[in-house]
Image (cartoon, helix red, strand yellow):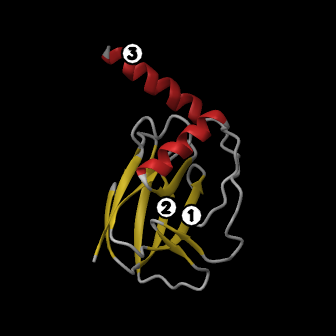
Amino acid sequence: MLVAALLSISISTSIAGGSHDHKHDNDANGKRVETVFGIYDPNMKPTRVVDVVMRDNMRFSPDLIKVKKGEVIKFRHANHGSLMHEFILGTPISLDEHAKMMRESPNMEHNKPYMAHVAPGESATLIWKFSETGQFTFACLVPGHYEAGMKGIVIVES
């Protein structure tokens, strides 16, 4: 059974290593965006920088990030792998739903302010304000990566 599980992860990871040229509708277009997990405004200035490394072992480092309510975080993402990776903020429910859509339509395009797509060896930034306390999630939704455990938690404290 363990061999079957590892083989499944290996196959989905290999498949996910292919092209990830896809888009989702951009509802930001340089405008303010509010979600249950925070706010994007093009005029925000970061109060802190958090570096996040993405690797082909399907892990983020760090995979637990603590912030204060109201903090504006500049995430700097570095892809240290040879596969495309992404960093998408959300809730467990929204990420589960999005991962399902990605499996059904892997050529979708992304372009929302809470999403960063990072090609192998490249880097990207994302600025986000955490306006509510609670526990939120981030994940790589390249098909197979999320299922292999490429996710993390943001804890927003008051």
Q: Please rate how many residues cluster around mark 3, counting C-alpha atoms within 10 Å: few if below 14, some from 14 to 19, many from 20.
A: few
Q: Please rate how many residues cluster around mark 1, counting C-alpha atoms within 10 Å: few if below 14, some from 14 to 19, many from 20.
A: some
Residue behind mark 2 = 77
Write the residue at 51% across / 74% down: 39
Secondary structure found at label 3: helix
Write the residue at 56% across / 46% down: 98
Whole-number angstrom distance, CA of label 2 to CA of label 1? 5 Å
Which quadrant is the N terminus positioned in? top left
Write the residue at 42% across / 35% down: 148
Whole-number angstrom distance, CA of label 2 to CA of label 3? 32 Å
Write the residue at 43% across / 56% down: 53
Q: Please state which amino acid type lies under the numbered disc 2.
A: His
Q: Is residue 33 above or below residue 1?
A: below
Q: Is residue 50 visible?
A: yes
Q: Is residue 82 visible?
A: no
Q: Please state which amino acid type lies under the numbered disc 3.
A: Ala
Q: Earlier in the sequence, mark 2 or mark 1?
A: 2
* Mark 2 or 3: the one toward you: 3
Q: Earlier in the sequence, mark 2 or mark 3?
A: 3
Residue behind mark 1 = 124
Secondary structure found at label 1: strand
Q: Earlier in the sequence, mark 1 or mark 3?
A: 3
In the rendered structure, find residue 72 and report the number of the disc placed on it: none
Give percent across and percent down for residue 94: 50, 51
Kindly indicate the quadrant of the structure image that contains residue 101: top right
**Left or right: 150, with 19 as reference point:** left
**Left or right: 61, with 18 as reference point:** left
Q: Are marks 2 and 1 in contact (CB under 8 Å)?
A: yes
Whole-number angstrom distance, CA of label 1 to CA of label 3? 35 Å
Q: Are marks 2 and 3 in contact (CB under 8 Å)?
A: no
In the rendered structure, find residue 4 and report the number of the disc placed on it: 3
